[in-house]
Image (cartoon, helix red, strand yellow):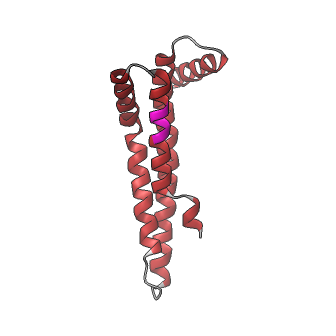
Amino acid sequence: MRLAALDAAHMAGELGAVLHGFAAERFPRRLAHQRALEAELGDLAAPLFDALARLGVAAEAIAHAPPDSAEDTVRIRWGAWADACRDAFVAADAAWLAIAPVLIAQAGAGGPAHSWWRRAIARGKSHA
């Protein structure tokens, strides 16, 4: 089923694990700093977590629709799911753009990947 391709609960769990991993990688022995960074990343990703929750609600509405639902009702539910899906992708883009500078700052001066992110973020700010 199409809904399983974008399992909102699974994606939210994976996102939480990734954010935890970033914090643990940067502060493996300084647990207070690790928790603070994880909380900051979670705050920046909050709109994405919210969008994923809305995606999950929209998917549940489709999955639990009565089999005899009118075609218009089904179309409306799929439309709501598609809108929630789009919103989740928009929120994901915004979250990663907000998270990247924090991770760069925590990593300090780095190699080419860090330089690329710094240039991309600086370019984005100059166009705003």
Q: Position of residue 91 (x, y in %)?
A: 46, 44
Going by the image, does 87 lie left or right of 123?
A: left
Relative to the observer, which residue lies in front, 88 or 71? 88
Q: Which residue lies at the image location 50% right of the left edge and 83% below the top edge?
A: 71
Please tell me which residue is depicted at 52% across the width and 39% down the height of the picture: 93
In the rendered structure, the answer to whether residue 47 lies left or right of residue 3 reads left
* Residue 49 in picture, x, y percent from top left: 41, 47
Residue 4 horizontal/vertical position (percent): 56, 64
Where, by quadrant of the figure, is residue 122 drawn? top right
Residue lying farthest right? 112
| Residue that lies at the very extreme toward the bottom in this rendered image | 68
Residue drawn at the location 42% of the way across and 51% of the way down = 51
Decide: is 86 above or below 111: below
Quarter of the image for the N terminus: give it.
bottom right
Residue at the location (52% across, 61% down)?
A: 82
Magenta segment includes 77: no
Report the magenta residues as a range.
17-21
Q: Residue furthest front?
A: 29
Q: Main secondary structure of the magenta part?
A: helix
Where does the image place residue 127, in percent across and percent down from the top left? 53, 24
